[in-house]
Amino acid sequence: MSDLEKSPLRSTSPPPYGTTDVEPEVAYHSQGEHITVKEDIFKDDFVGVSFHDIVYVVNTGCCGTKPTEILHSVSGVLPCGVNAIMGPTGSGKTTLLDILAGRKAKANVGGYVLVNGRPQPSNFRCKSGYVVQDDIVMGTLSVKENLMFSAALRLPSSTSWAQRKERVATVIQELGLERCANTKIGTEFFRGVSGGERKRTNIGMELIIEPQVLFLDEPTTGLDAYTAVSVVQLLKRLSEKGDRVIIMSIHQPRYSIFKLFDGLTLLSQGDMVYHGPAQSSLDYFSSIGYVCEERNNPADYFLDVLTKAEKSNVITESDDTDNSTGVTEANNLVNTYQESQQCVEVSEQLQTLADNSHTRRGVRSGGTYATGFLWQLMVVTIRSLLNLLRNPMISFFQVLTMVIFALIVGLIYLRLDEKDVNVRTVVTDRIGAFFFIVMNQVFGNLSAVDVFIKQKALFIHENSSGFYRVSAFYFSKVFVDLIPMRIIPSFTFSVIAYFMIGFQVSAAKFFYFALVICLTSIAAASIAFAISALVRVTGLANLFIAMLFVFQMLFGGLFISLDSLPVWLQWIKYLSLFRYSVEALAHNEIVGQCYCSNNATAAIIEACSGPLCVNGSEFLSGIGYETAPEWLWIDVGGLAAIALVFLLLTYFNLRMLKKSK
Ligand SMILES: Nc1ncnc2c1ncn2[C@@H]1O[C@H](COP(=O)(O)OP(=O)(O)OP(=O)(O)O)[C@@H](O)[C@H]1O
């Protein structure tokens, strides 16, 4: 049973008629799955968005504790124009905005939303615009490139490249971004456009699809006063161009912003205290005894009233303490609104819309994505490559780290083949070198943890807005990371370390060595990918990854002989990438070799006897490693299997992330 079903809801009635999957009233885009930018639901006489008895519950505790109700049956109509949702912090502004935008898990939401008097289509998220509070755009790309990215993925496949470019040019002009069109947005490494330009670019990313409904979560937060006003003025202009509903949550706007609002919704602790035209709000509050001073900003005044009301604890019902109900002033404001003429008028409007929705046919939701998988894969890969090329520090340092590691290992084990040492040391030094090399490869790839953590917010936002499928993002990230960040640095490492240490001079042996090193690196990176797609905090992800690596190291065969493990623990060695890697490298170099004192590379196995000689194969068997020829490839298969399993896990974790939103 969902949280909602368990909660004491006042109304959970579904949209009366018209599921989102009935006959379309207009012809769909020929490619079946693809959406058209404007569907019938957004056609003429757009009456806006209405929400009916919206309840939102969350499970805050555990073990069967009662779910918390965040929104308590709120209803209203948001017509074309700029509609602001205001209220003190924690009053439920963002929650309501997310529900209206279809971005909350349905299981926790009661009531229903109508768009233009019809049930909200299931792909509403992709057809409406949503500008999140923390601007989410790729910092290494310019304003124009970001907008092109949106145009490439969100306009239907039938749109020609010239039309996409034209749409981008129009949006740039509409938003007044001409001056900075070719300036990069900026990252933590370099400064780019200003805060206002960044916000306008975010709005532009959504305007590309000409959404008739645009949601904005606190669009003025973090902007200076002048820029904040200019952003809302821009929204006002956009709302006036065609029937467009702009719905924004906003905390405490200054007067010059407040006077641009057409509609105002005031929330207090999840209840509505006012809903209607912004310009009538002062009269409404005066009529119930809250008179705003002449020079006071109404927005500041309302917030003061609501904050004080939430903190008060007025006994209203009776002076007799036994019968008192402890109703707060905030409750009084809610009750007063519910009994007001204002509320009656809104209820009548809502009733009409609900009644009409019985007779209006629903609209087939169509597909979620405007373009096909291969196109998405290409566009997202190009963006990832551009991001990598423009952020060369990261790939440069990955190669540099591997070169430094290779030089350190090379210097420590320099020319092992020429050393005249104790015969046992000749073999153990080689195995020590392999272990050290594998350890470098495994821990040197911890940087892979950033791949999914850093762009998680970007992925969640773009995926839920219908830019691309999870698979397109996943393959592009994996492809763009594995080749330049794992394979190239690992091959460079192999070239330096192999010849400095002086392993066998044989092309086949060298390429096998390089293959194992690259696979080790890919397997380690895959483990980091899987965890980084699951965990939101880098520190926590690093901790989990390090624990997994250390555990695998324990069963790598060097700290304890694999044969001496208790029988019930023996299977764990098959999960250790250290075991496969060290075994493969040692097998490649040592099996079939005879190491004798003063002649470390003697390869005459028949003569390999006596106290001064060690048979490489026997030595490896002695410490529990496999020496049969087929194990050369079984070890490679083991590494590939670990990489594959964790790459698959990464994909499923990303899918879960998508669902959790
Ligand atoms: N998933 C959740 N689990 C627990 N509490 C939640 C959850 N989502 C929202 N809340 C609570 O619901 C209330 C409303 O949250 P919401 O973010 O909508 O408020 P807000 O008005 O946008 O606040 P702010 O202005 O501070 O952003 C808050 O008290 C918040 O702690």
Image (tube, grey):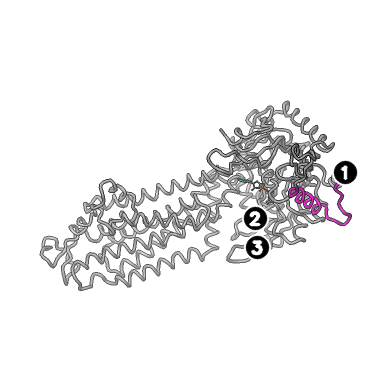
Q: In this view, does 597 lie to the left or right of 373?
A: left
Amino acid type of the residue that numbered disc 3 sits on in the rendered structure: Thr
Q: Distance between the residues labelled 1 and 3?
A: 51 Å
Quadrant of residue 407 within the rendered picture:
bottom left
| Mark 1 neighbour class, 10 Å CA radius: few under 14, some 14 to 19, many 20 or more | few
**Screen quadrant of the N terminus:** top right
Assess whether residue 504 is covered by the magenta stretch. Answer: no
Q: Name the residue under label 1.
A: 287
Q: Amino acid under label 2?
A: Asp
* Residue 478 image position (x, y, % from top left): 47, 52
Q: Disc 2 to disc 1, how far (Cα)?
A: 40 Å
Are dots 2 and 3 in contact, CB under 8 Å? Answer: no
Residue 183 is tagged as 3
The quadrant of the picture occupied by the C terminus is: top right
Highlighted range, magenta: 289-312
391 left or right, relative to 16: left
Identify the amino acid type marked 1. Ser
First-in-chain label (2 vs 1): 2
* Of callouts 2 and 3, the N-terminal one: 2
Ligand 1: does it lie within 8 Å of the C-beta at label 2?
no
Q: Which residue is denoted by mark 2 in the rendering?
A: 135
Question: Which label lies toward us, 2 or 3?
Answer: 2
Which of the numbered marks, if any, corresponds to residue 111? none
How packed is label 2: few (under 14 Cα within 10 Å), some, or many (20 or more)?
A: some
- Secondary element under disc 3, as helix, strand or loop, is loop
Q: Is residue 300 magenta?
A: yes
